Amino acid sequence: MKALILVGGYGTRLRPLTLSAPKPLVEFCNKPMLLHQVEALAQVGVKEIVLAVSYRAEQLEKELKAQEKKLGIKITMSHEEEPLGTAGPLALAKSILSADSEPFFVLNSDISCEFPFQQMVDFHKSHRQEGTIVVTKVEEPSKYGVVVYDDKGKIERFVEKPSVFVSNKINAGMYIFNPAILDRIELRPTSIEKEIFPVMAKAGQLYAMELSGFWMDVGQPKDFLTGMCMYLSNQKQRFPERLYNGQGVNGNVLVDPTAKIGKNCRIGPNVVIGPDVVIEDGVCIKRSTILKGTTIKSHSWIESSIIGWRCQVGQWVRMENVCVLGEDVIVKDELYINGGRILPHKSIGTSVTEPQIIM
Amino acid sequence: MLKAVILIGGPQKGTRFRPLSLELPKPLFPVAGFPIIYHHIEACIQIPDIKEVILIGAYQPSEALNRFISSTQRELNISLRYLQEYTTLGTAGGLYHFRDQILAGKPEAFFVFNGDTCCDFPLTEMWNFHQQVHSGEHFTMLATEATRKQSLQYGCLVENEDSHEVLHYVEKPQTFVSTTINCGLYLLTPEIFTHIGAVFLQNQADIFNGGDYINPVRDCIRLEQDILSPLAGSKKLFVYKTNRFWSQIKSAGSAIYANRLYLSLYHTTHPERLATANDNGPTIIGDVFIHPSARVDPTATLGPNVTIGAGATVGPGVRVRESLVLEGATLQDHCCILHSIIGWNSSVGAWSRVEGTANDPNPNNKHAKIDSNTLFSEEGKLNPSITILGRNVVIPSEVIVLNSIVLPHKDLRYSIKNQILL
């Protein structure tokens, strides 16, 4: 089986992190975002993965070569000259995807959930039509495009931002298609959601499969943190042994074994601490991700923030309200950072009391 | 024999110092570990000829005032009395009302202090200067330099640079007069009462010559406008200029500035009052005063310019900078206090941050004074100021209190920024 992952562009929504690393390599819960999907695909027997990217990413290619060997699968990059939307990349990779008659996966790259790939294959084979899309339940459907389908899963229509309730299920960005779909797609910028799915639904060729469990698009910092909380609570249920239970830990916390945590700290709930991170004494961290090689000095307090790679956060610093620190940022002692997005290699010497971007 | 009089005002005064003056007369507010006027009295005992210090004000006698008087008398071994005005009499009116008490024992001269100043008081120098002036009965006032702009907020005077006579005096002029400003410290002789008496009699006569019977300020005589202004140019008023530190204490924000000035003065006057780093104590940066009865964890970091009051508790990993922590306050683990005043018996929870904005004079101009900012800007927005917690305020763990004023007895539950919390 094969899969195509829609990686797309520069990942601007996740800046300043994506100024230093391509988005698929940014660690979500201590693992590059892309690897969560790639590993789950490998587990259900996918042998070849196509990454649809619209920029040259040598760092990404190099990293994936290493993963190819480890997981025993083939990973190809499909470079778009111009952004081709969500359907165009399928046409570009037609030769690979249509090499056999097996159905193939198509995935948006920013999704965090308990990937239901085997279930998708089974469901897809059971209804024998051209396509299956995974749907997930949301609380406020009027914010999204919703999917209306019958009790067998056959999709009737899509309604964009409904003003009256028609459904609470939205497209979860995970699909499985027969190669026949490729005949519907031309090599030009095309939206699969707006231009392809409605036609397929009309022809009775598109089915919806409901996702049980958590789902989050983690493509921007606020949702990244929400998705992290969901992921950690899912890990707690499935693999409680993967979570950290050292001293001063509160709730679901993931700590890389190479990280060091000082005395009298309170870590958690919902914290991810990456490799080689140093947390000094008396630090309190809640609902945050600390990426590789960063040091958090004594008595600091951090909530709802993403601290990038190799940062230095001083003593008695307070950070809250979705701060995002790029790579190698230095925050001096005793500062207050409220919702600051700080670009890489910056040294911060005065407090940022209102949310803003620091160039 | 000399005496000293400290004018401490009354409860109608010092409103800009709220909420800290809500429960304690402002002159008793502790700066660098001691009440504001304690520093005046300490300066007085440097001159052995000063045999008595008299406080004049309109405060009702209170336990705080009584306790201050009895403990200060004992500690400094000087006669100290409080004389209460029956109504606000003005700076000269109060002196005149109690002239017999002031003149009892026949002092040859007496100092008069405004109670809301802080200064490295040059009393000996002023007394020597006063004696060197040969101009019959005369009076001396202390003056310092201000910036051209800020001078308009003070009493401005023009001197004869050779004789140091005050040629002209005007209180808070609307246009520029002089950068030499009145420090609110005078050296007066008993003859001053002739001048105040004349004004008193004139005021009384005016009332019965078609004046306002009901006007309650009929007894009020102001030293600056009513006495000094007319004396200027009459060869009776002289000025001694100082370039030592001097500041008014008007807003609560100026208490932090005054704290810094007095702490720096301790290097020469009371080095034993400054905390020093030792193996079993907290980390000390710059000038810090810790009351002997305060408990400070050795892992805390204090300074510069910090005062920790009596019985206060400073927990592990706490950071305090440019702040006053008043008697009985508790700072819990890892909290961070910057540019703030933590009120009596208040507590700050673990990992909380209490932070204000410094309101210091321009450090690049040695004559700049602290601006006694109004609370609100002309657009009606709260000006960023130091953060003040009133008495018995509870700040929970892990919140931030930024540029805010919290009135007494408030139990806060969440973070606040740029607010006055009633």
Image (cartoon, coloured by chain):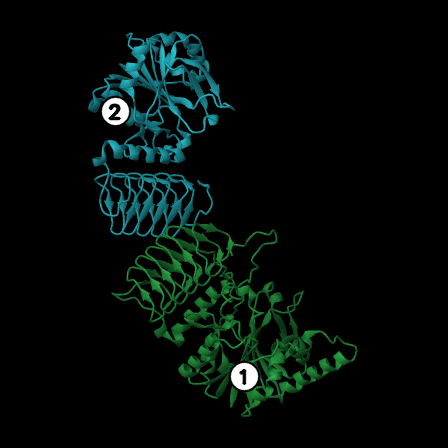
Q: What is chain B's hue in the picture?
A: green
Which chain gets the cyan colouring?
A
**Residue B78 position by quadrant:** bottom left
**Residue B289 position by quadrant:** bottom left
Q: Looking at the picture, tell me which residue is in the foreground, B4 or B176.
A: B4
Q: Chain of mark 2?
A: A
Label 2 is placed on what type of residue? Glu
Residue at image point 61% right, 75% down: B88
Which residue in the protein does label 2 denote?
A: A39
Outermost residue to the right:
B210
Residue at image point 66% right, 81% down: B231
Q: Position of residue B314 (x, y in %)?
A: 34, 62
Outermost residue to the bottom:
B105
Q: How many numbered circles are shown?
A: 2
> Which numbered circle lies on residue B29?
none
Q: Chain of mark 1?
A: B
Q: Position of residue A331 (x, y in %)?
A: 37, 47
Q: Quadrant where the C terminus of chain A lies? A: top left
* Relative to B240, A314 lies left or right: left
Distance of mark 2 from mark 1, alpha carbons? Answer: 89 Å
Check the image and report above or below for B7 versus A287: below
* Relative to B150, B415 lies left or right: left
Which residue in the protein does label 1 denote?
A: B129
Label 1 is placed on what type of residue? Phe
Q: Position of residue A134 (x, y in %)?
A: 36, 20
